[in-house]
């Protein structure tokens, strides 16, 4: 069990070290929101209506969860008013398993902007950002929960637990963005990024098969892992030695560097329509002091307990041996101190906005998003209504369908001269159904909250500039 303990400690330590930098997607509800300061981070072709300077940390902060799992899937009320887990025998197999998906995801997001500002020069828009970003993802196959719930109760049972995995990646990002308007109807933009990797961990069982029958139990597995950051994990007889895990103070100064680019374009056509598209985070980080591990082709069979009457072959020793054999599926052939270049998870946005001819301050937008992140990829479609009743006030409400289920979002943006403030969420429905004592969402854990305070300056150059000719500032 010591090996399992080391694996858990290592995973928890990497998660904790990245907690201060969890960064997910920007507020997608703000894609069509008039005057939203950080639209250019969703599409670098978009320009701000005024120059701005972000209040450090408070300029943009976002906390969120994205998942197709729900707390109500794992906890069930009992007759006496208490709760019990899904593994309790009183909860039927079908009740629990039918509430799960083939692939069950959990993404944790926290994004904080350290320094950010933007300014206009004629028809161009310039931005500079320094931020702390990261992603944390979990992928749990349905068969993992089926194994936990059913086990060998059905006699001949097979479980495919392939692609079970977890990934954490944190980085510092320094970005320069440039956008320009061409012929008054074409907008193009790009953001160049210099990246410094802080910590990365990726563990996945690419192929893992369990077969349980009355005659024998068997397991076959093959996986990989990568760990980079201020940790040390040595090898023993060619295998990664979990007992050697420790923090490495000599590697507190990052030596992992890379680059990326965001590209965007937007077209105004037929007077009331704007089509746009962007691709974000096309790039990589070269990770130094990277521990690379791969499992050898592993298989194990158990044909039943032997004679348990002798002390050397006691039942508890045989059970311990079974446990150790199962944990051997997580043995990795190690290659310490390797350098490995890892591509970033890219994001594609495609949008279409239609302004209402009877009231141009009202528009409807359709946004499609695709996140390219191997086993942690997801797709979303979002329909929004956006209104700007005043030049300094805008609101948005939207409905989305994604791999995480359906969601309803909203945003409020105050963008007056000298001061801007926004608050928004891509999904607030889980916040409407929480446990009474701890306020934990019981529906799908798919929610986030973003807010920011910024100082604005310069002449107004928003979409309603024709309505503000009197503005001499």
Image (cartoon, grey):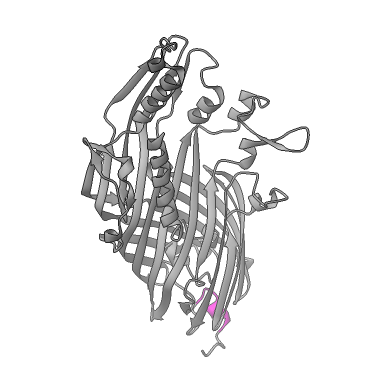
101 in relation to 49, above or below = above
Residue 465 part of the magenta segment: yes
Residue 96 in view of the camera: yes
Q: Residue at x 36, y 64 (%)?
A: 172
Residue located farthest toward the right when viewing the structure as drawn: 80
Residue 284 part of the magenta segment: no
Residue 44 in view of the camera: no
Residue located farthest toward the bottom when viewing the structure as drawn: 472
- Counting from the top left corner in percent of width and height, residue 404 is at 54, 43
Q: Residue at x 50, y 47 (%)?
A: 380
- Counting from the top left corner in percent of width and height, residue 242 is at 33, 41
Q: Quadrant of residue 85?
A: top right
Q: Residue at x 48, y 13 (%)?
A: 156
Residue located farthest toward the front when viewing the structure as drawn: 311
Q: Residue at x 40, y 34 (%)?
A: 163
User: Which quadrant would the N terminus be assigned to in this image?
Assistant: top left
What stretch of residues is rendered in magenta?
Answer: 462-468
Query: 1 or 407, which is in the foreground?
Result: 1
254 in relation to 90, above or below = below
């Amino acid at each position: 069990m010591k090996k399992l303990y080391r694996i858990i400690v290592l995973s928890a330590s990497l998660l904790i070290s990245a907690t201060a930098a969890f960064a997910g997607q920007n507020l997608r509800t703000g894609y069509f929101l008039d005057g939203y300061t950080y639209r250019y981070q969703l599409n670098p072709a978009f320009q701000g209506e005024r120059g701005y300077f972000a209040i450090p940390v408070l300029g943009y902060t976002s906390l969120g969860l994205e998942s197709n799992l729900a707390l109500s899937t794992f906890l069930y009320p009992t007759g006496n008013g208490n709760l019990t887990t899904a593994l309790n025998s009183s909860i039927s197999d079908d009740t629990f398993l039918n509430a799960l998906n083939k692939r069950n995801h959990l993404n944790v997001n926290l994004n904080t902007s350290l320094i950010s500002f933007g300014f206009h020069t004629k028809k161009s828009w310039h931005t500079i950002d320094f931020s702390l970003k990261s992603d944390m993802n979990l992928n749990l196959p349905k068969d993992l929960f089926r194994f936990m719930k059913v086990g060998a109760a059905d006699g001949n049972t097979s479980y495919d637990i392939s692609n079970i995995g977890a990934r954490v990646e944190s980085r510092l990002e320094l970005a320069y963005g440039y956008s320009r308007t061409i012929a008054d109807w074409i907008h193009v933009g790009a953001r160049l990024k210099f990246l410094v990797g802080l910590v990365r961990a990726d563990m996945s069982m690419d192929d893992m098969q369990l077969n349980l029958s009355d005659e024998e139990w068997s397991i076959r597995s093959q996986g990989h892992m990568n760990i980079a950051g201020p940790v040390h994990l040595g090898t023993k007889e060619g295998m990664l030695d979990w007992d050697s895990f420790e923090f490495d103070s000599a590697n507190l100064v990052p030596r992992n560097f890379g680059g990326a680019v965001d590209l965007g374009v937007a077209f105004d056509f037929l007077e009331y329509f704007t089509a746009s598209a962007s691709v974000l985070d096309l790039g990589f980080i070269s990770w130094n002091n990277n521990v690379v591990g791969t499992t050898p082709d592993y298989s194990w069979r158990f044909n039943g307990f032997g004679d348990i009457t002798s002390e050397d072959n006691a039942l508890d020793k045989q059970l311990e041996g079974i446990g150790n054999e199962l944990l051997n599926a997580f043995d990795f052939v190690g290659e310490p101190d390797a350098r490995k270049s890892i591509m970033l998870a890219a994001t594609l946005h495609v949008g279409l906005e239609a302004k209402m001819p009877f009231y141009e301050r009202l528009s409807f937008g359709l946004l499609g998003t695709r996140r390219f992140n191997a086993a942690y990829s997801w797709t979303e479609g979002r329909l929004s209504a956006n209104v700007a009743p005043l030049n300094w006030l805008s609101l948005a409400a939207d409905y989305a369908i994604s791999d995480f289920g359906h969601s309803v979002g909203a945003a409020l943006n105050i963008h007056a001269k000298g001061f801007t403030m926004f608050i928004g969420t891509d999904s607030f429905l889980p916040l409407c159904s929480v446990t009474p004592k701890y306020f934990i969402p019981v529906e799908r854990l798919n929610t986030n909250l973003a807010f920011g305070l910024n100082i604005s300056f310069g002449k107004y150059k928003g979409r309603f500039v024709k309505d503000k000719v009197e503005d001499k500032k």
